Amino acid sequence: MSAPLSTAEVMIGAIAPMLTPLSHVAVGAQSPIPGSAALLARALTKSRLRVSILGSEKHNAFTDGGRELFDCAGQGRIDAFFLSGGQIDGGANVNLVGTGDIAAYPRATQRFPGSFGSAYLYFVVPRVILFREEHTPRTLVEKVDLISAPGTPAPEVYRPGGPHALVTSLCVFSFDQTRARFTLASLHPGVTRAAVRSATGFDYDEPAHVPETASPEPAALGVLRTDVARAVAQTYPAFAKRVW
């Protein structure tokens, strides 16, 4: 009997199908869940899906780090990317700078790692998948304290990229860019609508029927826990040890 699915595995299983029809998926630093999902999608489809994981020696063809990633994205050669943040709000705005009195930055109440190229990639990559393991009103807020990367642009701004979905430890939200609003797309196994509503600081749409997030098939789970786990351990050893 296989071990029960962990929260991380549920999130990986939810993200992987979003990547299967694509050609090139890029994963930023410190993103083991998206990295695992990208490697799983490539393994399951047996396709030529290119996976570029910053910080990986084996799964990264870039030789100039972030600058080469930005150049590739600007040319339209990256189909999907992933963003997380200290705060994410209902308009898919991301805060990677800090909380509290941002006007007093850098003396903010709490400081996050920084924006780096998040805003740029958010604008040019066609499919940006947001993710956050911690699903609480502290992280998913009504309005971010500072917008590092905006979910939707001003009307006169050209933007080929943008948010596609938000995957958390409780559920999957889809995002409608025309309405700048999330919709509850699926609930992870054992999670209720009420649990998601109470843990979410922003308002969102909720259809009459919300399906359960599909779990990986036994064969896919086997690949995830063997081939993918070994590959991920090369770049994220602490994560692989914790999950597998």
Image: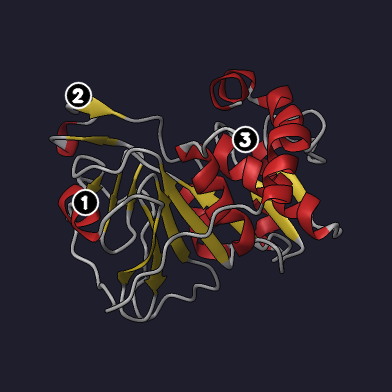
> Which residue in the protein does label 1 denote?
195
The residue lying at 36 percent from left, 69 percent from top is: 152
Q: Earlier in the sequence, mark 2 or mark 3?
A: 3
**Quadrant location of the N terminus?**
top right
Q: Which mark is residue 2?
A: 3
| Label 2 secondary element | loop
Q: Nearer the viewer, residue 180 or 187?
A: 187
Q: Nearer the viewer, residue 56 or 201?
A: 201
Whole-Å distance between the Cαs marked 3 and 1? 27 Å
Q: Disc 3 residue type?
A: Ser
Residue furthest out toward the front: 1
Whole-Å distance between the Cαs marked 1 and 2? 34 Å
Q: Position of residue 226 (x, y in %)?
A: 75, 33
Q: Which mark is residue 107?
A: 2
Asked whether disc 3 touches disc 1, contact meaning CB atoms under 8 Å apart, the reply is no
Q: Position of residue 190 (x, y in %)?
A: 35, 50
Q: Position of residue 52 (x, y in %)?
A: 73, 44
In the picture provided, is 24 more to the left or to the right than 127? right
Q: Position of residue 197 (x, y in %)?
A: 19, 57
Residue 68 visible in the displayed image: no
Q: Quadrant of residue 92?
A: bottom left
Residue 73 visible in the displayed image: yes
Q: Earlier in the sequence, mark 1 or mark 2?
A: 2
| Label 3 secondary element | loop
Q: Nearer the viewer, residue 226 or 132?
A: 226
Q: Residues within 10 Å of mark 3 (few under 14, many from 20)?
A: few
The residue lying at 46 percent from left, 59 percent from top is: 213
Of circles 1 and 2, the one toward us is 1
Whole-Å distance between the Cαs marked 2 and 3? 48 Å
